[in-house]
Image (cartoon, rainbow, N blue to C red):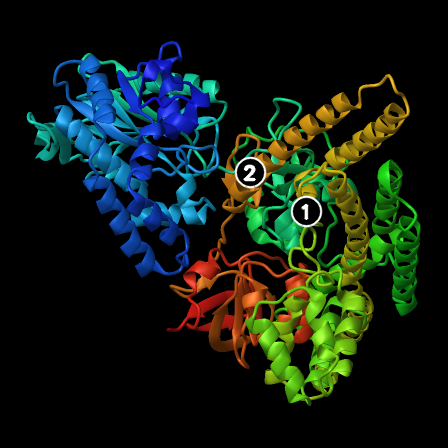
Amino acid sequence: MIEQYVVDLQEIDATHIARVGGKGAHLGALSRIEGVSVPDGFCVTTDAFRRVVAGAPSLTDLLDRLAGVDPDDRDGVRTLSARIRRALEDVELPKDLAAAVTDGFARLGADVPCAVRSSATAEDLPTASFAGQQDTYLNVVGPAEVLRHVSRCWASLFTERAVTYRRRNGIDDRAVHMAVVVQRMVFPRASGILFTADPVSGNRKVATVDAGFGLGEALVSGLVNADVFAVRDGEVVSRTIAAKQRAVQPLPGGGTEEVAVGRQQQEQPALTDPQVLELVRLGRRIEAHFGRPQDIEWCLDADGGFRIVQSRPITTLFPVPGADDQDNHVYVSVGHGQMMTDAMKPLGYSMWQMTAMVPMHEAGGRLFVDVTARLAAPATRAGLLDVIGKGDPLVRDALETVLERGDFVPSLPDTEPGGVPAAGGGRSGAPGAVETDPAVVGELIERSRTSVAALERDLRSKSGPELFDFLEEAFEEHKRVVGDPLNMRAIMAGMEATWWLNDTLHDWLGEKNAADTLTLSAPGNITSEMGLDLLDVADVVRPHPEVVAFLQDVHDRGVVDGGFLDGLTGLPGGPGARKAIEDYLTRYGMRCVGEIDITRPRWHERPGALVPVILDNVRNFEAGAAARRFEDGCRKAHAKAQDVLARLRALPDGNRKADETERMIDTVRAFIGYREYPKYGIVSRYFLYKRALLGEAARLVRAGVLPERDDVFYLTFQELRDLVRRDASASASASASASDAASAPASDADDRSARAGRLGELIRERKEEFRSHEALTPPRVLTSEGEALTGAYRREDVPPGALTGLPVSAGTVEGRARVVLDIADADLEAGDILVTTFTDPSWTPLFVGAAALVTEVGGLMTHGAVIAREYGLPAVVAVDRATRLIRDGQRIRVHGTAGYVEILS
């Protein structure tokens, strides 16, 4: 390729990003949109940057050294970044390169003032905007100054903030190159930012305009507050006019200065309403061209026309689920109910969709259920809000916020549409849908085990297209087991009994959350047993110092795969420890953090993930702790039951109340533990599905179709199925061709190579998309307009400064907060309070060592709440931004009965 150092903006389009960077490519594309005015200019291409770097060996060496610096070594990053910047600013430009830039400048006019702006190849991308990470220089006058500021733009690629931002987004510093945009300077009457979607709420139908006098630097730097206009459906629906006391204006000889705004002008709007509407219409045209909401920098020139000086995607918006119609829709997050709000890979979310009991819609790597029809019909609306409110009042509040608007959700007749069951609760009497007989639970567990065993047996003989045909049948069996009416009645019996006890005993006795104690050590809870069984593993390890030291070394070295188990064999006590761990994996090895995503590594695949928890248990507990803990819970539950019943019998009509309550206690003890088993059965099946699919992936790698086995995680189930079928067909065709002397097998090989290339590109795109999804925070409720609603607590009983949440397990505990974002980093000591984003069943082993629990996500019947009650841990969940507002090591007080957290130090 012939090097080209300068190219005019009019010659650039969106395909030229590698040569002109993100900003340059966007400006070139903008200049081609009819009706959009972009200041004239040119780009100094990345060819120029690469030549300068290649011509200075010291720069290459510094870049290599920067790549080797630990991302957490801020001093190292700062020092090397500063040295690279100085080297770039000091380098002498080759004469032919300088001449090309000078010629480009001359084409704009003699000594015309210019804006010189950085345009990195990793900038203004759909997945990462890099806004403000590199430098822009305004009112640059003369060719020498333009050349100097080009070098300064190159240097700004290596500011500490830019390097840190790239590392956060997984981008190698050496893979990024810098172009520089040089444009004719606009001296505006007003300037600012247009967002074609509301950047706060996410609403795609609301555009917001920030405006101020003079150059936009006053707004960007925070020198003044902007006028803010909101526009919807061609109408200004709100405006806030700020007192704009300062402005940034150009100096005659170059550069800019702050100036005072005249008193009479300060509170005048920077734009009139007609100008705002004209600007938004222009923004909608730009948005339509790029196919996504835009963050647009604009200027209003002296002639009253708008000039567009930049447009980039708004990367912080949560995507909207696709729909087949233009109707309004309201979606509820599945992840908040499942206690797993992380982004899922395509194979993960597509598998959950195919095995779910209701239709689910993907957006941002998360799944949502459309509840519009249930909200629209008055009869089902009340039931939906009731059951959702019992689980997570923030979701209910968000839904009620939408309903209060009156016009978003249509009103439908009282029919019974399909979808999320709108099961009610409350004090309507004991649920009589299932007999209080522990044998019911035993029967359901045996049905599940039989079904899982049959699946494992049948999968052994399946491969290729036949495997996928079988899996589609297996998914129907999966749903049949989960949707078994007896299964659903057993689950609801435990939940409704819990609600009944809490509500009724509060009315009759003034008891708050009485079920928390009454459900301690409930029998048959597979998830709480998982935590206690790991205490038993620690009992096997604890007497053997060599085994403890070996496991500590495994943990220190970050070993996660199962190879370390072989190292136990030769140690005193090692064989017993190995057997204890392997027996644990036999029962629980299908589990992991984020287990609803089939692509997550299971404990069977990475048993080293359990080692830090085993070591904590060795350190923090004595032998027999599991049995003592369970027995202690049983005693407390029995004592609570006797106390409640005695107090009830002392009331008017007390015998009837006591008898009804006793039946409900029997019901909750019989069924609440089973609440966790269906999830265990689902995850057991998922592990078998995954094992079979990875077998196919390995075969595709051997056939040269896939580069790596785990690349299948970035394909949906349907895409993987079609890929396997095409490969089987191609292999059959190749076999037939090989036996036909007149055939041309080389063309078949070429076709396969081309398909592999297209597949590789798709996987690369999906990986980049997944990284962008990981950076997004999913809302509890999302509308088809893109509005993200998180809900709010409407409470007045919380002390000032306390963090409000949902009380799910009674008690008050004060202790040291341990903010844990990754279970592998957990290091709990006796009395510590676990603070994290969410806890699915895989976190249960940590609960046995915690004094209390605080999470950002959760509800009354989510896994973390159920297990906290079984273990007697005070717990408050759904505490907004808990992991950011509570610092690791702070002393906090958790009010598990009242539902708030106090920060004490």
| 18 relative position to 564: left or right | left
Q: Residue 527 occupies which quadrant of the picture? A: bottom right
| Amino acid found under the numbered disc labelled 1 | Asp
Q: Which residue is mark 1?
A: 710
Q: Which residue is mark 2?
A: 769
- Identity of the residue drawn at 72% across and 73% down: 565
Q: In this view of the protein, which residue sits in the foreground, 800 or 461?
A: 461
| Amino acid found under the numbered disc labelled 2 | Glu
Please, what secondary structure does the residue beneath circle 1 have? helix
- Identity of the residue drawn at 43% across and 49% down: 167
Image x and y of residue 184, in percent: 21, 19
Image x and y of residue 867, in percent: 68, 68
Q: Nearer the viewer, mark 1 or mark 2?
A: 1
Identify the mark nearer the N-term, 1 or 2: 1
Q: In this view of the protein, which residue sits in the foreground, 636 or 177?
A: 177
Q: Residue 681 occupies which quadrant of the picture? A: bottom right
For the question of whether residue 359 can be seen, the reply is: yes
Q: Residue 736 occupies which quadrant of the picture? A: top right
Image x and y of residue 902, in percent: 43, 69
Q: Which mark is residue 889?
A: none
| 375 relative position to 649: left or right | left
Q: Find the residue positioned furthest to the top.
A: 34
